[in-house]
Amino acid sequence: MVRNYLKIAWRNLIQNKVFSLINLLGLSIGIASCLLIFLFIMNEYSVDQFHRNRASIYRVMRNIDEEGKSISVAYLSGPYGPALLNDFKGQISRAVRVRQTNALVTSQNKSFYERKAIDADPDFFQLFSFPLLRGDAATALTNPGSVVLTESTARKYFGSIDKAFGQLVKLDKNLPLKVTGIAQDVPTSSHLSFDLVVPLANYKADPYMTQWINNAVFTYVQLAPSASLAQVERSLPGFMQKYMGPVMKQFGFRFSLSLTPLDDIYFEQGAFDNLKHGDKKVVYLFLSIAALILLVACINFMNLSTVRAMERSREIGVRKVLGAVKQHLVWQFIGESVLLTTLSCGLAVGLVALALPAYVQLLGQPIQLTAYALPITLFLIGIIVVTGFLAGSYPAFVLAAFSPIQALKGKLRLGRGSTSFRQVLVVIQFSISIVLMLGMAIVTRQLHYLKHKELGYNSAQTMVIPIENEDIYNFLTQRKGDLLGQSQVSNVSLMSGEPGGYFDAQMFDVEGHDERWRGRTEFVDFDYVKTLNLKIIAGRDLSPAFATDSTQALLLNRTAAAKLGWTPQQAIGKWLKNTLRDSTRQTVIGVVEDFNFLSLREHIEPLVIEPSDDQRVGLVRLKPGDVQAGVEAVTALYAKTKPAYPFDYRFLDEQFDQTYQADLRQQTILGVFAGLAIFIACLGLFGLASFLARQRTKEIGVRKVLGASVVSVVALLSKDFLKLVLVAIVVASPLAYYGMNRWLQSFAYRVEVSWWIFALAGLVAVLIALLTISVQSIRAALANPVKSLRSE
């Protein structure tokens, strides 16, 4: 019987090529889209899952209470780790500190600039499951004069891991290290990434390792099997009061500690740790899109299978007369649905294999199809079972319920309820498509607004040069005059953070204020305002012409002055004292107009601009004209200093793409999947229009004989579908408005959700639907009525 069912199912698929192709293509695209999204979600949730001890590993977070909200930061100072290990004996079994850094490594008279170097405690390879191909995980980092390379790094330096083991390399031109371990390359599914690991003991005298107030390392702890997370966290306030109480009282900070499970670090937002992170909101967005696209594809199948009932009515009548029971017919039609879904899954896998390279590039992260072979197989089986049964169940029961007498007489008609249900499905299809279309339009408009918003500073033709080593520092400080002497260079300035970068938050004593005040800080040289072309709205700029400016002067932005209760003019002459730096009071000599030095997701905050040698980045503004010539002039001047470190730079106006990289990817992905959803919906509409035109062949013939024009016939066949699309617009618009309005709330600066976006999306949807329907409607309207009536 099963064999007979399969034969009949296959013959029906072959006999009705157009409907089968539409169903097969729609389901294949829907399943392929779901599979791509499934791979992304699997990839996101696989991060850090390879660590054996992951259930007991936590990262210690420093929480800062500011203006009623808590901000979590991943960086701690060096003393935290040993103190936690000492004070929580029996509860914390390991504490490992990790510092991100970069290094110049010299090997066999060749130098390599490594941007993914880390300094770590000796237990690093015992806490984390990064396997060593050579060396002992327990001892590889115990000697300060040791280093562990990854497999790729070892091959790059020495040609093979065997040759690398035991060799000497030199770090930053002066620290000799012996290769005591070769680690497997770090998996892409790790929030930590490195090419070499250096013992942190080499830097034990550095201020961030000795002073509690300085922060530069991550601290990971492993809880003992008998320890309770809740119990440890209850004791953390006492720990902070013991070690940081006097410091917090002295400087006016309010700190607390918390523990983030290793499994949650990847999805942690706002940790300011410069590590690889994901966003659960994006995962949920993708999951929703997958469900919606699959629903659209299933609706296609249900609609087209139901309308084909008319063509199979006599087959059903003959089967029932010959003794077929309803249950057998139901399984026959569900079997056909499962068969078509299985074929669609096979085609979907092929589509995924073809699309994967472009998809990986779009996501910006590697995905290996073979790495998820078992989950993919289970996923496809689930799709076959769920989609095959759900999408095939309604048409199966409708078809199996036909009266055999009516079917054999050819008088069978689908009931009004069936037609209404089919119309509801079409409305759902186009509602989903319009929601995705509106989402894409609003995301695109918001990102366009962000990209072209006036930020309050000039970012054009400005090179951003990170100060990551002594060669760059010496070049920018000692050769600044030579840089300004280049014909292509306009301004040069050194500062602690470029706009869009990181800005410290520090506490100040303020004239006329009893409580300490928090403000963002920017440490600069005297050329900062000129280089960024900021506007002075009161007072004057910092200047070397005034001897006291280097130690006793500062600038505020407009927001800082307002927060302190001053107008820009009133702020001039007032004093502030940075509690973290020294006891010198600094006088406000100028106020600059507000500029967006943070992301546009955030409102402009108070900013204090102080002269200081705390310089972490340099800006070189080039004159208008040949930018490439300017870059070449700067790099050539740097080369004359005979540096060991390479020259690295980017342009300030490229900061947009980096800051909103995730949003730009979401925009593209949303556009792709919205297009696929619309395409699938149009496939279904095309099939329904084909069926309707074929069903009304005789009516069209009679109308044409009686003088009906082609236009009137096309309007007759199109109007019912267009009504459904209009209903879909009405349903989709409030849903899209609610969802996108919530998304826009994450931006401090955002566009208004205007009515014309909905009108435009609705017009596009109507035009797409009209174009789809018209193909069949015009064909039917142009048919010879004589042939139509004769065939009847």
Image: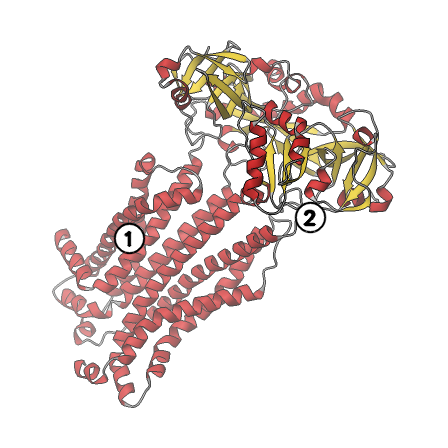
Whether residues under marks 2 and 1 lie with C-beta atoms below 8 angstroms apart, the answer is: no
Q: The residue tagged with tag 2: helix, strand or loop?
A: loop
Q: Label 1: which residue?
A: 388
Q: Label 2: which residue?
A: 456
Front-most of 185 and 14? Answer: 185
Q: Look at the picture and state if 606 lies above or below 260.
A: below
Q: Looking at the picture, how far across and down is residue 493, in whole percent?
A: 68, 35
Tell me which residue sits at (50%, 56%) in the image: 439
Where on the picture, by quarter, is residue 787?
bottom left
Foreground tag (2 vs 1): 2
Q: The residue tagged with tag 1: helix, strand or loop?
A: helix
Tell me which residue sits at (71%, 38%) in the image: 528
Please indicate, yes or no, whether residue 283 appears anywhere in the rendered image: yes
How many numbered circles does the render carry?
2
Front-most of 708 and 467? Answer: 467
Q: What's the CA distance linking mark 2 and mark 1?
A: 57 Å
> What's the amino acid at mark 1?
Gly
Where on the picture, by quarter, is residue 656?
top right
Q: Looking at the picture, how far across and down is residue 221, in whole percent?
A: 54, 21
Q: Crowdedness of circle 1 by 10 Å Cα count: few (<14), some, many (20+)?
A: many
> What's the amino acid at mark 2?
Gly
